[in-house]
Image: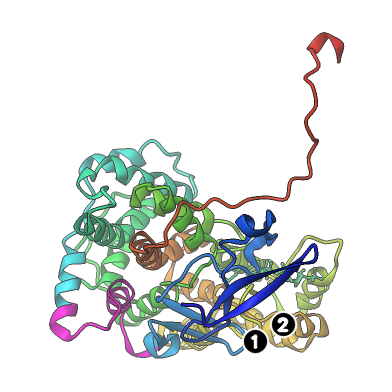
Amino acid sequence: MADSNATLTLDGGDQQFPVHSGSVGPDVIDIRSLYAKTGAFTYDPGFTSTASCESKLTYIDGDQGVLLHRGYPIDQLAEQSSFMEVAYLLLNKELPDSATLDKFTHTITRHTMLHEQLLQFYRGFRRDAHPMAIMCGVVGALSAFYHDSTDIADPHQRMVASHRLIAKMPTIAANAYKYSVGQPFVYPDNSLSYAGNFLKMTFGVPAEDYEVDPVVESAMDKIFILHADHEQNASTSTVRLAGSSGANPFACIAAGIACLWGPAHGGANEAALNMLREIGTPDRIPEYIARAKDKNDPFRLMGFGHRVYKNFDPRAKVLSKAATDVLDKLGISDPVLDTARELEQIALKDDYFVEKKLYPNVDFYSGVILSAIGFPTSMFTALFALARTVGWVAQWNEMITDPDQKIGRPRQLYTGPTQRDYIPLDRR
Ligand code: CMC
């Protein structure tokens, strides 16, 4: 099985460890026997050099700016495919033919409604609740409503749960928005596309007909494709870790949503647009660049930098172009786009950003498009969660069927007190 061996010298003794090669990408040193052989652990906070699993889903070459889903480049998928097709590809390994895609789309469409009782759940939230708070709660609560798809040992139940999650996420996200603006929930319209249905549930009102704008529908679908999966990022690793204990899929995806919410991850799209609006005009950019470079200031350029991409984020390239296209087609002139373009140009020429290889990431331009479509910034991360659900469920399914799968249980470098005797309260 091993392609070669690596030798570790520790306390004068040599130990051999197998080295495995993937189909592409860095080799991995298989250190599963390290503790048994040496009594030592590895130390890698933030997993900067650790492959946590074997996967056939998504490949990233951060130096070349490459992102492949099942081998297909993200720019080709974004330009030529559809979100339903990418969802099928991620879940089922190959692109579907036309009849298979129709069947898959029909299956997803049949699961778009929420259990009516679940709608009551929304009413327990404050009207000003962040949509991500609602998403965490409602998605976790799905476990209490769909008992017939929580047996993770049954492949059929796993697939039903995956379809339900992909299908219901737009309804859940749209309802979170409707609740915040005090409008009635709009039921799914299964004659529409996945993106079109989501737009209608978000922006439609029962009192009026809602026409899906094809420009907006296509931009929405592209944004969903670009966020569908991204290898072992923080939220996906969270889903896998939660799932490794045997937790049901709805609970696992709720855990992923919680992790995605952070501003260093999916929350960056909201933070990036808020930052661009705060900057306001291009003349204030130098002030913010200076703050981002100041070690004593916690401020960072949101939508810039990436753990893996050290050249450019291919998703940002697609979105940068899409931002101009969408605003042009919608006839919107938003100074935020000018500020974003200027900020990108200035940062890319600045030594600090050049040396640290900090480039715009997916979150830098997505907010400009989402804002043009009419979403409030608080919905941005919820849209990311909606799209990433496809990747989460695909990764979760892959993990459950991996024969090497074990409960995820990292170890630690302990630096706290060694054993000491308890001192009663009256003697402290
Ligand atoms: N602005 C200013 N400086 C930065 C930035 C930034 N956006 N990002 C990284 N740096 C600096 C950082 O201060 C550090 O400097 P030094 O080596 O002197 O201490 C160096 O670059 C490396 O940064 P790091 O935090 O060690 O790198 P990381 O791989 O742990 O973090 C990151 C990656 C994405 C969390 C980080 O770049 C960041 O916080 N960016 C802003 C938030 C953001 O846009 N996140 C979205 C990521 S893409 C979508 C997603 O994953 O959800």
In what quadrant does ligand 1 lie? bottom right
Q: Which mark is residue 311?
A: 1
Q: Which mark is residue 371?
A: none
Q: Which mark is residue 357?
A: 2
- At label 1, the amino acid type is Asn
- At label 2, the amino acid type is Lys
Looking at the image, residue 82 sits to the left or right of residue 42; the answer is left
Q: Residue 246 location, x and y as percent?
A: 37, 48
Q: Residue 209 location, x and y as percent?
A: 21, 65
Label 2 crowding class (10 Å Cα cut-off): few <14, some 14-19, many 20+? some
Q: What residue lies at 19% left-to-right and 79% top-to-bottom?
A: 101
Q: Read off the magenta span.
A: 79-101
**What SS does tag 2 mark?**
loop
Front residue (pair 116, 341): 116
Front residue (pair 276, 228): 228
Looking at the image, residue 277 sits to the left or right of residue 178; the answer is right
